[in-house]
Amino acid sequence: MTTNRGASQDALRIARAEGGAVTKTHAGAIHSPVSGRTDHLPTHVASGSYVIPADIISAMGEGNTMAGFKVADRMFPGPTGAIPMNGSSVPVVVAGGEYVIHPDTIASKWGSLDDGHRTLDEFVKQMRAKTVKTLQALPGPKRD
């Protein structure tokens, strides 16, 4: 996820072009035909949302992003899709394969946004370490 000033301005420009003020935010899976790790989709998320990176979602699905989305939906039940705004939003630029957890889901699961964000940061680090360990243990290509 990119949150630099240019990305924020792009997201606001697109919102204005689509009719003015931002009235909805996104939560849940980010579907895109463009491969992950390419922040190119301007959108708005509810303030306090958490974006799980695409590589983590793929790893949760054992290399399959769609399966990872299903795992994330079970782990983080809550609002998904275009959510009517009932607070502030943050313009972001996201990548296909990422997953946005709504702040209401975070607060209900961990009691506070701060605790939830700390736990999710640690979860991402642990998933990356586990994925690296798994990949290192795989056999190399078969040779004839």
Image: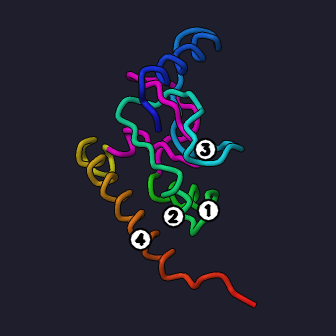
Above or below for 42 versus 49:
above
Name the amino acid, label 2: Met
* Residue 87 placement (x, y as % from top left): 38, 23
Q: Which residue is mark 2?
A: 60
Name the amino acid, label 3: Gly
Residue at the (32%, 46%) spot, across then down? 108
- Cα distance between the residues tagged 1 and 4: 18 Å
Q: Which mark is residue 130?
A: 4
Q: Secondary structure at mark 4?
A: helix
Name the amino acid, label 4: Lys
Looking at the rendering, the stretch of residues picked out in magenta corresponds to 77-106
Dot 1 or dot 4: first in sequence order is 1
Q: Is residue 34 left or right of residue 105?
A: right
Q: Which residue is mark 3?
A: 96
Above or below for 75 versus 116:
below
Dot 1 or dot 3: first in sequence order is 1
Dot 2 or dot 4: first in sequence order is 2
Q: Quadrant of the C terminus?
A: bottom right
Q: Is residue 63 left or right of residue 49?
A: right
Label 2 or label 3, whichever lies nearer to me, is 3
Q: Which residue is mark 1?
A: 67
- Cα distance between the residues tagged 1 and 3: 14 Å
Q: Secondary structure at mark 2?
A: helix
Residue at the (46%, 31%) spot, across then down? 45
User: Marks 3 and 1: in contact by CB < 8 Å?
Assistant: no
Label 1 or label 4, whichever lies nearer to me, is 4
Residue at the (51%, 28%) spot, across then down? 25
Dot 1 or dot 2: first in sequence order is 2
Label 2 or label 4, whichever lies nearer to me, is 4
Counting every numbered tag in the picture gives: 4
Pointer 1: residues within 10 angstroms few (<14), some, or many (20+)? Answer: some
**As rendered, which of 7 and 74 lies closer to the eye?**
7
